[in-house]
Amino acid sequence: MRLIAHRGASGTHPENTMAAFRAAWDAGVRAIEFDVQRAKDGALVVVHDNELKRTSGDSRAVRELTLAELQGLDAGGWFDARFRGERIPTLEELADAAPADCELQLEIKQAEPPYAGIERAVKAFLDARPAVKARTVVSSFHHDTLRALRELDSAVRIGLLPGRMPLEPAFALAAELGAESIHVNLERLSADWTARARAAGVKLLAYTILTEEHVRRAAELGADGVFSNFPHFKVPA
Ligand code: G3P
Ligand code: MG
């Protein structure tokens, strides 16, 4: 079973910051998950919430600020004073810093209204970096985003976040998208999902793993991988 560092080592470091990703790499993990949104000036940035309040203390939304404005915010102090000065990374900065053997689970975090054209921007980013593209899986809860991406690019690797969708429609959508993996909440994971995934030739990944007990449950149910905030957790081979 594979461990993917969810928002980096976000259990011990401020999520989606370079400090969190470096901690995951230092722990020997070679797969990271992160959330991508678009700044006012089009820059692709790594941040989870559509609003900046929780992790940067600003009352505005990500889309209202330019990259320079976003990078003027402190994205680490909310977690612990010793991380004060951590910035919201750009997708480029993160991809450049990642070890050459690190899988990138790039989640497009859509907003309301959606970031129109973000699929094209992500595709252009990946097309300019073939080696990065080869080890990147793009996922989203926003299924029209995944459909648009697939329409633009028959080769890009896609993972489906089904959210609350029932099992059969989720597998039908995964087939439509040519998704290589389905990423389900651990609370929804059951042997039905993993058996169905095996039959479909699709990987089943579970989030969010916060305890060793979660690791055991995911392993027992036959998950292929887990998104964990704690990259030092031992997972069975
Ligand atoms: O990609 C798995 C997980 O990251 C989805 O939920 O809210 O943590 O982005 P969230
Ligand atoms: Mg995510």
Image (spheres, helix red, strand yellow):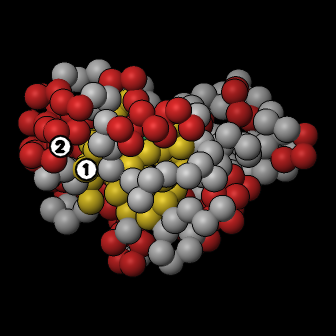
- The residue to which callout 2 is attached is 197
- The residue to which callout 1 is attached is 203
101 horizontally vs 72: left or right: left
Q: Are marks 2 and 1 in contact (CB under 8 Å)?
A: yes
Disc 2 element: helix
Disc 1 element: strand
149 horizontally vs 128: left or right: left
Query: Considering depth in this image, is 127 or 214 the residue closer to the camera?
Result: 214
Quarter of image, res 24: bottom right
Query: Seen from this angle, which residue lies furthest right?
Result: 81
Residue 144: tell me if it is visible. no
201 horizontally vs 205: left or right: left
Where does residue 189 sit, x and y in percent of width and height? Answer: 32, 29
Quarter of image, res 114: top left
Task: Look at 41% across and 59% down and name the residue there.
Answer: 237
Identify the mark nearer the N-term, 2 or 1: 2
Where does residue 39 sit, x and y in percent of width and height? Answer: 56, 45
Marks 2/1: CA distance? 6 Å
105 horizontally vs 30: left or right: left
